[in-house]
């Protein structure tokens, strides 16, 4: 039995569908019973648990051969990351009680960066899970191409996409969420000991200008990239409701300045197969790639 958190998202959903297609037993760990109905109809066992509820999580993880851990995203954390710490404490307590045979944790590129940034929250979880002495795979994917969902309306309406990744002709490590889910489905079924780190990016690195070209191809109209000036970020993010935008800004700095990167420039990373045009086409059509 594979217990899957984050199953209602793109990565967790692709992971679960891939396992189900292989006739593997899946337990969908969800917060909302209504969202669990879809997965029950597909053949999953359903367990209700909040990520901050250690007792409910322990019940959801008990009896699992392997557990997939995907913490909720926190894009505007309080200073010191108390939200992440609460989830980490709960997950660790639950795993200690349930004692699954293996753990697969969806981390991220940048989790191991020495400089603090938004992705440090995943590094905190990595460190906590390593202490459990349970076989652990840490999957670190690149920047998700699917983040371009925020650019669909602008590309369609104005022919512009606004990029915080800069310069716009710089190639960044990116990957499709679909490839992350499928890779996770392979990794979670493997046997291993100790802790292993798996890096994952797409078939080729992508510039923000490449993303504009992908939108142009899909929409059949010119689309270009505009870099958002660095000195406007703080005010812009706060105008959008963020209270503590600095970690997000540091993360973007890390990508732009190159201190968020895979080991050896990604030479050891697994390469996915889904290209940017396929992801953008799916986003524009509001469907899975």
Image: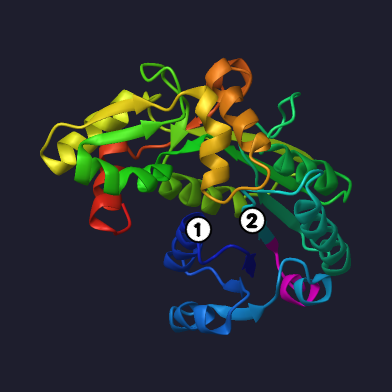
Residue drawn at x 23%, y 29% as measured from the top left: 213
Q: Nearer the viewer, residue 159 or 61?
A: 159
Residue 123, image x, y percentages? 75, 39
Left of 273 or right of it: where is 229?
right
Q: Which residue is mark 1?
A: 15
Q: Which residues are magenta?
A: 58-66
| Res 82 label | none
Residue 199, image x, y percentages? 58, 33
Which image quadrant: the N terminus?
bottom right
Colouring of the image: rainbow
Instruction: Residue 261: tell me if it is visible.
Output: no
Left of 138 or right of it: where is 92?
right
The answer to whether residue 106 is above or below residue 31 is above
Label 2: state its secondary structure.
loop
Q: Are marks 2 and 1 in contact (CB under 8 Å)?
A: no
Crowd band around label 2 with a 10 angstrom C-alpha radius: few (<14), some (14–19), many (20+): some
Residue 63, image x, y percentages? 75, 73
Residue drawn at x 73%, y 43% as measured from the top left: 121
The answer to whether residue 222 is above or below residue 124 is above
Left of 119 or right of it: where is 202?
left
Residue 64, image x, y percentages? 71, 69
Q: Nearer the viewer, residue 158 or 63?
A: 158
Q: Nearer the viewer, mark 2 or mark 1?
A: 2
Label 1: state its secondary structure.
helix
- Residue 56 found in image quarter: bottom right
CA gap between label 2 and label 1 equals 12 Å
Q: Which residue is mark 2?
A: 70
């Amino acid at each position: 039995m594979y217990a899957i958190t984050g199953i209602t998202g793109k990565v967790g959903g692709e992971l679960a569908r891939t396992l189900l297609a292989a006739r593997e037993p899946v337990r969908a760990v969800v917060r909302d019973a209504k969202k669990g109905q879809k997965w029950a109809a597909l053949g999953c066992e359903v367990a209700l648990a909040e990520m901050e509820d250690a007792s409910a999580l322990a019940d959801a993880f008990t009896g699992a051969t392997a557990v997939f851990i995907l913490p909720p995203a926190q894009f505007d954390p309080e200073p010191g990351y108390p939200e992440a710490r609460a989830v980490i404490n709960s997950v660790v307590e639950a795993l200690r009680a349930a004692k699954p045979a293996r753990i697969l944790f969806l981390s991220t590129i940048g989790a191991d960066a020495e400089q603090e940034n938004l992705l440090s929250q995943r590094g905190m979880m990595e460190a906590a899970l390593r202490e459990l002495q349970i076989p652990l795979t840490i999957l670190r994917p690149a920047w998700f191409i699917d983040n371009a969902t925020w650019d669909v309306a602008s590309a369609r309406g104005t022919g512009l996409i606004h990029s915080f990744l800069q310069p716009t002709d710089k190639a960044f490590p990116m990957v499709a969420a679909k490839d992350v889910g499928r890779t996770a489905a392979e990794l979670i079924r493997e046997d291993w000991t100790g802790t292993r780190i798996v890096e994952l990016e797409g078939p080729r690195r992508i510039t923000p200008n490449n993303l504009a070209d992908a939108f142009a191809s899909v929409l059949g109209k010119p689309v270009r990239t505009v870099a958002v000036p660095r000195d406007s970020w703080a005010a812009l993010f706060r105008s959008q409701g963020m209270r503590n935008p600095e970690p997000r800004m540091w993360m973007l700095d890390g990508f732009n300045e190159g201190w968020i990167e895979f080991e050896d420039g990604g030479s050891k990373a697994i390469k996915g197969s889904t290209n940017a045009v396929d992801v953008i086409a799916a986003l524009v059509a509001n469907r899975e790639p």
